[in-house]
Amino acid sequence: MDSPVGQLAWIMDKFREWTHPRNVDPDKIIDRDRLLTNVMLYWLNGTAGSAAYVGYAHSGAWGASKANFGVPTAALVLAHDVGIRRYSEPEHTITRWTDVDHGGHFAALEEPVLLTTDVREFFRDLR
């Protein structure tokens, strides 16, 4: 977080690991200006540390059951992310679950039409 070059390297590593397909450079999947804008937003706001910390700050074991409050929940699981419905169901009232064989962690950047369509269809069912 104390170096713009280090910030660029850290974020580009995340894009390299989490975009799909993994063997394609992120700037071939997501516009280079968008990638640089993403890096710049972390840099100008000084939020890299808090963004990286969230995974370490999770209290308790992953999958430890919590209360389910009945709120309708949707999941769009793209190819590179991991979503296991049976582990999600105890804590969430899943009304829509969509598995997709393409796309990665950055759905809004990689598959914006797919994401928008899925969100609209989820909320359409709640009217």
Image (tube, rainbow, N blue to C red):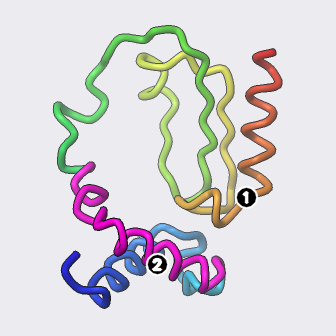
Q: Write down the quadrant of residue 2 in the picture.
A: bottom left
Disc 2 versus disc 1: nearer the observer: 1
Q: At numbered mark 2, what does the secondary structure look like: helix, strand or loop?
A: helix
Q: At numbered mark 1, what does the secondary structure look like: helix, strand or loop?
A: helix
Q: Write down the quadrant of residue 35 in the picture.
A: bottom right
Q: Residue at x 62, y 57 (%)?
A: 107
Rendered-image quadrant of the C terminus: top right
Q: Which of the numbered marks, if any, corresponds to residue 112?
A: 1
Mark 2 neighbour class, 10 Å CA radius: few under 14, some 14 to 19, many 20 or more: some
Q: Write down the quadrant of residue 10 in the picture.
A: bottom left
Q: Pointer 2: what residue? A: 16
Name the kind of residue labelled 1 in the image.
Pro
**Magenta span:** 29-54
Q: Is residue 46 magenta?
A: yes
Rendered-image quadrant of the N terminus: bottom left
Residue 17 sits above or below residue 70 on the image: below
Q: Which of the numbered marks, if any, corresponds to residue 92?
A: none
Q: Residue at x 42, y 16 (%)?
A: 90
Q: How far apart are marks 2 and 1 (CA)?
A: 18 Å
**Horizontal and vertical percent position of residue 61:** 20, 33
Q: In this view, does 1 lie to the left or right of 95?
A: left
Residue 54 sits above or below residue 4 on the image: above
